[in-house]
Image (spheres, coloured by chain):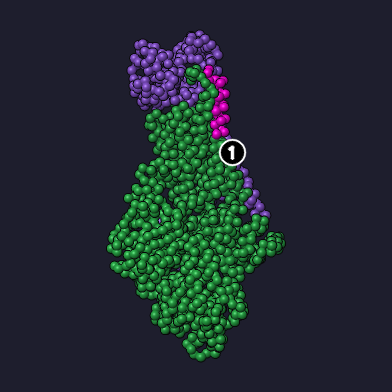
Chain colours: A green, B purple
């Protein structure tokens, strides 16, 4: 049925009628896409053409295709066509094989998914079907722990209230359960599988969107005698394809979106391909080389024309019949394009890919980036930008979950005018108060190893006394009256105890947490944010325990007594609203409970609040020590008021304006509040965050912290994680209007200039709204960036996810510096994608950040190693690799160029065809890849194993510690782009030119027509070419050997065996390769002294030049890495001598012992001096 | 302290493999250059002394032998004694044996004895048939058909150098012929079956002739020397007469023709460039060594002063 023409997607609002009998009409089938999912790109027939086409979207491949085509035209071709086609086929084949393999995997998983079984209810009879056969309007039965085959609207569930729980880890990575629920009316109709209503139901749904948490649809249920009633549906009724049903026996759902229309498929966006800066420059250089190649070809072709005109006709031995010099020199142009083609590094891209994959492997294997707590190693998701890790200039960091643990501790609460929680201990062993002990017996809080969002050390004797009703003096009368707007409903809180009860009841009621039980029936709370969990948890520990909820009810155990309230409405928290609220019916009293950010709630309070001033004072203090504060408030509604609201709510317009209408409606309701109290929660710092940030600042990386917190809190967290250090000048930018922003920026500019003059460190703290002025105004942005770029750190507070990305772009677009964004939550995704390098942390807020990142880490501290060690090394490796690649192609092409003069510019190839092919592909490939994989300028980990002796091992550890301290100061190498620069590139290219000329002309002068054998034979073209080629291989290997700073066995083997030995073997083979230029030559040639004398001479000259160059550079430019390495070498030498002497002393008899002891004392002094200098 | 895990795989993954990290210092550079200068000076002296032992002389003859297709006699004077074996070369200039059109114009399989048909000989373009080759008689003086394929075919074969030489020693006006042997002159590998006759009656030249083999090994540069023969006796200094069958035309492309006498030693023929290059490298290394040594002592003196 899949060959029928069905649309890929259906992009207009849809009307669905429940397909009770599960009969498929043709019309219906054609309207909506099938549930068959195809993520694969090719099939057997289309693979070859399609994937080839994809390959040729790369410019390099087009170029090489052109070359191959020219190669196949005999008049132009100078070489065996195979020798040009072979590498192209190899490179294309490799990429296509990878593509094919990946697509095969997609086919397998597609088939698996499409043939997964599901249960369709056909006239109430459960019938086994497959996912692929599912159609819009089908009734589907999903059982516990199964996944949903399409996007469904839940009609009923096994739970009486209609609630069900889903886990969406496959969609957004969030492991916590999300409550969903059927609307009450449909639950009634469909609660029994055997007997459910068979009347037609209808759904009107909007165009499917990407947003996982949005559903715009209404359900029309039969209410007898052919009438239907409309019910508005929300995301609460939406079950997503790919999510799992948990904690619920079964549900019945109606299929609304299928196949490509489902949320999961709409979210599967194409992966981005990032390319690094080095690669971009490299591509420009390749273009430059292309220009050089064409220029050289034109030059050679014009010389060819000159030669042909002067001598061509006279050289009878060439027998030009029908002699056309101009045409011939035109041919020569193409021939030389082919010959100089060796200048373009065809295999560079492939080699780079290999090296980067290996580098990624090392990053992923690094135990120092292992986080035991989460059992996570680092993960590399984009391998193409490894070296940019070594060039980072700006880090944009999220705060919550990145710098801080996102682990909250309930520190203080203010209820009424009283602050509770002053007495809590700061030790890690919490002293449980009486209530908590009672909780423990019911096992609500198992001390499991599972990560806990909340830490609870709170204790307050007065509070527990009041709660226990021990008539404490704290229980003073307050007489707070809360009345509904129309005065029909009224609640009075007469004493502090009532207020406290109301406060904690609010905490345990107004939230979106659910209770989750593990195998041992231990309960824990799960929720959208750790703040929320902490508050619910704290309330529970203090005796106000939330024990579960359904769509319409909340259950509590309050101070040991069961309590039930009706949950009427719940309005979720989001970053714009910054508040969440519930409406409950508590024994006939309808209350709105709300909690939210202080500035939001403050604006919505009734005038003349009893506690406002006191609470605000406390909050100011709290934010100074970096605590997160929320305000709690309530409103009482009369039944009439609620009815009115409910009516408006159910009759919201069913279109795009719905969301904003709803926003308006709720916003209206959440007014005229009465303040009850506030809470203060501490956000704990992640391990080693201050140390890491200090080192990053030392490495001259500017760290920006972006957070949604208020200015004071943000600044305090910044101080506690050493983003702002004692000697920093802090400038603050928090203004209400553009004009003031301009003025303030001017002031900041003055301070800033002063700092620059006095060489002081500085930091700017910016508030979200001011930041918006800056982003929106070009002049301000310019002024801001010009200052911000040199500030050691910047703190942006009160920023939205979008602003985070804007800030990143502000720097990225203006300064052309490498930026890195790190974050852990869904709100950081924008910023992670905007930056050059996106780093996601495995956090508690789900996997969205990790999924959209280039590198995923366990903790912030791993950034130290990722940037300062891996980044540093990878930059050096890649940069030198690219330079070397251009060099080695240069020395290979230069002899060809000069030879053209000696062969009358005729387009004769200087080298044997296959020798040309194998040069990049085999003989010089592996040493380069090995070097790019293993080279290190310096490693602080010098020892695989420490010495047996504790005292020596201690010195060794001390040395490691010392070297570790030095690493930030080495970071400049990549950051200032010191290796891959245009002058450096010119130097290497010039080196290549000179070396190529030395090789060519020395061999020319040595073996031109001189007699090369003692048996009198003179040289000829093939031996000449063989000698030059051998020299080139030797020099290419010599050069890489000189530049290898870290010789592992792999480097050694790759140079000796995989380059030189392979070459020797091929030379032997080529002696027998019929029809080639080299046939019958090598065996005789290697017996001639001239061959070896030339190689030795050229090796010595170029080696000597390199050594002199290196020595001069060393004398005049000190390289910190080498300096450190030298120091280490000397130190190690001393250490070894000392150890040796110690051993000797042990062996010597008493006569010698005295003498050695003297010597040892001297050595030890030296050692002490060295370790002293390390401090 | 936790126990350190051991093993290669750990060291590999953590990038702390045992490795050699050479740190070049002034001392190591001085030692390197000292050793290099020693080696190259010694080698240079050896090479130059060997090279000086070699007797060699060349004589241009195309300017004397102006008449084509005729015998031409020139008298030459050898300045020194030549020890056996003496090698006799001809040398051509401005002749581009390495021209692309020329180099490829041969059929390696035909040369090695495979009787290929005409259509398989397109490598030989533009010289495929006997007419193209301009030959009508085979080596064995059988007539050759004009439109038959030429064996061997191709430009290289066609332009075979066909001047012949006879050498006479002139002692007191008597002329004694000195044999110039045409065997043992080809590139040793070329004798291992690279050239095989197919049917001498259809061939216009003997492909197993070593002079042919020497010609077929195309030269690297437009000025080249090829071995024509070997003289297995000593040649004393004195007057000699060379009778040249002067057929080969070089004047059309401004070429020159020479004959060359030379002896060899273990390092081949006379090669002044090589020996001079070795000595130069040795001297330069010596200077560099001294320079670095001075630098070293200066910096030591500096250090002492600073103390």
Residue under the point 61% across and 68% down: A711
Nearer the observer, A194 or A141: A194
- Viewed as shown, does residue A6 lie left or right of A911? left
The answer to if A308 sits in the magenta stretch is yes
Residue A19 position by quadrant: bottom left
Residue under the point 45% across and 84% down: A434
Q: Label 1 is found on which chain of the structure?
A: B
Residue under the point 56% across and 47% down: A980
Where A689 sits versus B150, above or below?
below
The answer to if A915 sits in the magenta stretch is no
Quarter containing the N terminus of chain B:
bottom left
Give the dominant element type of the magenta stretch: helix, strand or loop: helix
Residue under the point 56% across and 21% down: A309
- Residue A260 lies, in percent from the top left, at 41, 54
Nearer the observer, A50 or A1017: A50
- Residue A315 lies, in percent from the top left, at 51, 19
Residue bearing the label numbered 1: B284
Task: Provide the residue span drawn in magenta.
Answer: A294-314
Nearer the observer, B25 or A3: A3
Q: Secondary structure at mark 1?
A: helix
């Amino acid at each position: 049925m899949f060959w029928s023409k069905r649309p890929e997607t259906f992009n207009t609002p849809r009307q669905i009628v429940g397909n009770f009998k599960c009969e498929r009409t043709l019309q219906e089938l054609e309207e909506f896409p099938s549930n068959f999912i195809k993520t694969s790109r090719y099939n057997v027939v289309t693979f070859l053409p399609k994937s080839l086409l994809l390959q040729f979207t790369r410019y390099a491949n087009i170029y090489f295709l052109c070359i191959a085509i020219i190669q196949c035209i005999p008049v132009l071709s100078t070489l065996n066509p195979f020798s040009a086609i072979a590498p192209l086929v190899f490179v294309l084949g490799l990429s296509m094989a990878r593509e094919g393999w990946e697509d095969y995997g997609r086919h397998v998983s597609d088939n698996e998914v499409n043939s997964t079984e599901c249960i369709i209810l056909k006239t109430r009879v459960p019938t086994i079907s497959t996912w692929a056969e599912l159609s819009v309007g089908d009734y589907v039965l999903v059982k516990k722990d199964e996944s949903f085959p399409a996007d469904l609207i839940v009609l009923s569930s096994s739970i009486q209230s209609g609630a069900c729980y889903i886990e969406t880890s496959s969609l957004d990575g969030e492991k916590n359960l999300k409550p969903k629920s059927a609307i009450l009316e449909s639950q009634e109709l469909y609660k029994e599988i055997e007997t459910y209503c068979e009347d037609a139901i209808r759904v009107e749904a909007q165009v499917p969107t990407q947003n996982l948490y949005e559903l715009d649809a209404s359900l029309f249920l039969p209410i007898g005698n052919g009438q239907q009633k409309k019910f508005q549906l929300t995301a609460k009724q939406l079950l997503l394809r790919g999510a799992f049903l948990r904690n619920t026996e079964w549900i019945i759902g109606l299929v609304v979106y299928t196949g490509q229309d489902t949320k999961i498929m709409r979210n599967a966006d194409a992966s981005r391909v990032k390319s690094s800066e080095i690669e971009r420059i490299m591509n420009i250089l390749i273009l430059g080389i292309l220009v050089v190649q064409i220029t050289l070809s034109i030059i050679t072709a014009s010389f060819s024309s000159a030669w042909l005109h002067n001598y061509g006709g006279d050289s009878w031995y060439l027998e030009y019949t029908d002699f056309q010099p101009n045409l011939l020199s035109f041919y020569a142009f193409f021939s030389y394009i082919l010959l100089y083609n060796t200048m373009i590094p065809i295999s560079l891209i492939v080699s780079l890919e290999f090296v980067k994959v290996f580098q990624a492997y090392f990053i992923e294997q690094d135990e120092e980036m292992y986080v035991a707590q989460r059992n996570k190693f680092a993960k590399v998701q984009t391998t193409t930008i490894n070296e940019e890790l070594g060039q980072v200039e700006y880090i944009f960091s999220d705060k919550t979950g990145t710098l801080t643990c996102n682990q909250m501790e309930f520190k203080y609460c203010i209820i009424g005018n009283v602050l509770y929680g002053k007495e809590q201990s700061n030790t890690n062993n919490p002293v449980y108060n009486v209530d908590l002990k009672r909780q423990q017996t019911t096992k609500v809080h198992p001390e499991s190893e599972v990560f806990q969002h909340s830490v609870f050390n709170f204790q307050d004797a007065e509070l527990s006394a009041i709660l226990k009703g021990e008539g404490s003096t704290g229980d003073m009368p307050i007489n707070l009256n809360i009345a509904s707007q129309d005065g029909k409903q009224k609640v009075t809180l007469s004493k502090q105890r009532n207020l406290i009860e109301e406060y904690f009841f609010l905490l345990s009621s107004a939230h979106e947490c659910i209770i989750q039980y593990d195998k041992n029936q231990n309960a824990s709370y799960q929720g959208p944010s750790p703040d929320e969990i902490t508050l619910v948890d704290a309330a529970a520990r203090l005796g106000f325990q939330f024990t579960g909820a359904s769509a319409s009810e909340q259950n509590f155990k309050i101070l040991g007594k069961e309590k039930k309230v009706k949950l009427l409405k719940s309005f979720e928290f989001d970053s714009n609203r910054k508040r969440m609220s519930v409406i409950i019916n508590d024994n006939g009293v309808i209350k709105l409970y709300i909690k939210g950010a202080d500035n939001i709630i403050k604006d919505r309070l009734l005038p003349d609040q009893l506690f406002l001033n006191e609470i605000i004072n406390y909050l100011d203090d709290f934010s100074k020590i970096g605590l997160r504060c929320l305000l709690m408030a309530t409103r009482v509604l009369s039944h009439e008021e609620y009815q009115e609201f409910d009516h408006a709510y159910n009759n919201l317009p069913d279109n795009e304006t719905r969301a904003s209408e709803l926003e308006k409606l709720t916003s209206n309701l959440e007014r005229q509040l009465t303040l009850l109290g506030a809470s203060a929660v501490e956000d704990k710092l992640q391990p080693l965050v201050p140390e890491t940030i200090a080192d990053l600042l030392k490495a001259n990386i500017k760290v920006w912290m972006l957070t949604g917190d208020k200015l004071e809190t943000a600044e305090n967290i910044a101080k506690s994680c050493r983003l702002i250090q004692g000697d920093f000048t802090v400038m603050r930018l928090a203004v209400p209007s553009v004009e003031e922003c301009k003025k303030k920026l001017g002031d900041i500019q003055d301070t800033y200039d002063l700092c620059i003059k006095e060489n002081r460190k500085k930091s700017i703290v910016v508030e979200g709204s001011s930041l918006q002025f800056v982003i929106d105004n070009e002049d301000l942005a310019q002024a801001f960036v010009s200052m911000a770029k040199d500030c050691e750190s910047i703190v942006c507070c009160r920023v939205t996810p979008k602003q985070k990305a804007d800030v990143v772009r502000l720097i990225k677009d203006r300064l052309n510096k490498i930026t890195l964004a790190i974050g852990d939550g869904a709100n950081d995704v924008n910023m992670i994608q905007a930056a050059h390098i996106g780093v996601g942390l495995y956090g508690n807020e789900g996997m969205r950040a990790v999924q959209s990142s280039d590198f995923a880490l366990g903790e912030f501290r791993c950034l130290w190693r990722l940037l300062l060690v891996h980044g540093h090394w990878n930059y050096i490796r890649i940069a030198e690799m690219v330079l070397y690649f251009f060099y080695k192609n240069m020395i290979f092409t230069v002899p060809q160029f000069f030879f053209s003069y000696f062969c009358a510019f005729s387009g004769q190839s200087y080298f044997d065809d296959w020798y040309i092919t194998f040069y990049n592909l085999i003989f010089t490939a592996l040493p380069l890849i090995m070097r790019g994989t293993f080279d290190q300028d310096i490693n602080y980990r010098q020892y695989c194993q420490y010495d047996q002796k504790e005292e020596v091992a201690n010195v060794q550890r001390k040395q490691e510690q010392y070297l570790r301290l030095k690493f930030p100061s080495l970071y400049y190498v990549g950051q200032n782009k010191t290796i891959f620069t245009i002058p450096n590139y010119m130097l290497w290219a010039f080196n290549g030119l000179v070396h190529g000329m030395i090789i060519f002309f020395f061999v020319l002068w040595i073996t031109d027509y001189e007699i090369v054998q003692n048996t009198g034979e003179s040289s000829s073209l093939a031996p000449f070419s063989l000698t030059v080629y051998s020299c080139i291989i030797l020099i290419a290997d010599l050069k890489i050997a000189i530049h290898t700073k870290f010789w592992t066995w792999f480097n050694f083997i790759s140079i000796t065996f995989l380059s030189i030995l392979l070459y020797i073997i091929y030379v032997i083979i080529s002696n027998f390769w019929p029809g080639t230029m080299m046939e019958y030559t090598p065996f005789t040639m290697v017996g001639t002294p001239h061959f070896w004398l030339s190689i030795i001479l050229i090796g010595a000259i170029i080696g000597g030049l390199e050594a002199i160059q290196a020595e001069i550079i060393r004398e005049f430019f000190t390289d910190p890495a080498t300096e450190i390495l030298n120091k280490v070498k000397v130190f190690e030498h001393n250490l070894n001598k000392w150890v040796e002497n110690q051993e000797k002393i042990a062996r010597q008899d008493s006569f010698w012992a005295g003498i050695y002891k003297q010597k040892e004392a001297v050595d030890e002094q030296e050692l002490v001096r060295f370790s002293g200098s390390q401090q | 302290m936790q126990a350190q895990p051991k093993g290669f795989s750990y060291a590999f993954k953590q990038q702390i493999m045992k490795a050699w990290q050479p740190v070049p210092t002034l001392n190591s550079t001085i030692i390197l250059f000292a050793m290099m200068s020693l080696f190259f000076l010694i080698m240079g002296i050896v090479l130059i002394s060997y090279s000086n032992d070699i007797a060699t002389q060349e004589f241009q003859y195309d300017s004397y032998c102006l008449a084509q297709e005729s015998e031409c006699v020139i008298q030459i004077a050898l300045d020194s004694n030549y020890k056996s074996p003496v090698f006799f070369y001809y040398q051509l200039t401005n002749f581009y044996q390495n021209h692309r059109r020329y180099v490829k114009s041969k059929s390696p399989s035909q040369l090695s004895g495979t009787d290929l048909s005409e259509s398989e000989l397109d490598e030989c373009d533009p010289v495929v048939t006997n007419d193209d080759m301009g030959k009508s008689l085979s080596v064995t003086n059988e007539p050759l058909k004009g439109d038959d394929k030429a064996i061997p075919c191709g430009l290289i074969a066609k332009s075979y150098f066909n001047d012949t030489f006879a050498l006479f020693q002139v002692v007191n006006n008597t002329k004694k012929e000195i044999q110039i042997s045409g065997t043992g002159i080809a590139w040793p590998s070329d004798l291992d079956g690279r050239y095989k006759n197919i049917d001498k009656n259809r061939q216009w030249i003997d492909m197993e002739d070593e002079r042919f083999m020497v010609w077929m090994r195309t030269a690297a540069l437009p000025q080249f020397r090829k071995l024509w023969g070997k003289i297995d006796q000593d040649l004393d200094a004195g007057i000699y007469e060379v009778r040249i069958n002067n057929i080969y035309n070089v004047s059309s492309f401004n070429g020159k023709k020479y004959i060359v006498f030379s002896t060899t030693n273990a390092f081949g023929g006379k090669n002044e460039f090589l020996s001079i290059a070795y000595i130069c490298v040795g001297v330069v290394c010596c200077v560099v060594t001294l320079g670095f040594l001075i630098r070293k002592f200066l910096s030591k003196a500096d250090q002492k002063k600073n103390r």
